[in-house]
Image: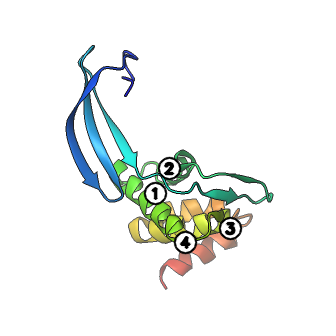
Amino acid sequence: MICPFCKKDNDKVVDSRAIGSYIRRRRECVECGHRFSTREYVELQPLTVIKRSGEREAFQREKLMKGIMNSCKKRPLSTSDIEQVAVNVENALTVTENFEVSYEQIGNLVMQELKKLDPVAYVRFASIYREFKEVGEFVDQIKSLDK
C-alpha cells in the first residue's frame, strides 16, 4: 500500500477488523511513521448504473458516498454511520443477479436507509434525487415520514 503522506510503498498492518462486508486495516508507514486506514472489499462482478439520460457507467462507491455525505452535512451522524448506509446499499445491489441497476434503484435504497437513520438527511437526499421543483413536493415528502 502506498503511504498517502510520503508516497512510499513500505507499511505494516497494525490492526485489522471485519466490519460488515469489508475489512478495515490500520496501517503504519515504516518510512515516515504516519498511520492511515484502508478498507478491503470483495470484488464481485462490476455493477453498471443506468443513468437518467440512459447512459451507462460503472458503479462508483465514491460517488455514492459523496451523495450521501452531502445530504448528511451538519447532521449528528458519524462517518461510520454514513459508511454503513453505503455498505447496506451496495450489499442490496450485489444480492441481485442483475449487474445493471438504475439510478432509481440506488436512490430508493439510499432513501430507505436515510429514512431510518436521519429524517433531515432523508429529505435533503430526496429533494435532489427526486428533483423537487415546488415547495409542495417538500411538504408531501415530509408528511410521508409520519407514515
Instruction: List the residue tagged with mark 4.
Output: 96
Categorize mark 2 by other alpha carbons within 10 Å: few (<14), some (14-19), many (20+).
some
Question: Up-down: is 140 above or below 72?
Answer: below
- Distance Cα–Cα, label 1 vs label 3: 28 Å
Left or right: where does residue 92 sit relative to residue 133? Answer: left
Left or right: where does residue 125 sit relative to residue 15? Answer: right
Q: Is residue 112 visible?
A: yes
Compare marks 3 and 4 and give the one earlier in the sequence.
4
Q: Name the residue rendered at 36%, 54% in the picture.
A: 77
Categorize mark 3 by other alpha carbons within 10 Å: few (<14), some (14-19), many (20+).
few
Categorize mark 4 by other alpha carbons within 10 Å: few (<14), some (14-19), many (20+).
few
Instruction: List the residue tagged with mark 3.
Output: 135
- Res. 129 image quadrant: bottom right
Instruction: List the residue tagged with mark 1.
Output: 86
- Pick out the residue farthest to the left: 14
Compare marks 3 and 2 and give the one earlier in the sequence.
2
Name the residue nearer the viewer: 51 or 23: 23
Q: Name the residue rendered at 54%, 52% in the picture.
A: 64
Left or right: where does residue 5 sit relative to residue 140? Answer: left
Q: Name the residue rendered at 55%, 57% in the picture.
A: 45
Contact between labelled residues 2 and 1, with CB atoms less than 8 Å apart? yes
Q: Three-letter amino acid code at disc 3?
A: Val
- Distance Cα–Cα, label 1 vs label 2: 6 Å
Q: Name the residue rendered at 36%, 43% in the picture.
A: 39
Question: Which callout, 1 or 3, points to the residue nearer the camera?
Answer: 1
Instruction: List the residue tagged with mark 2.
Output: 65
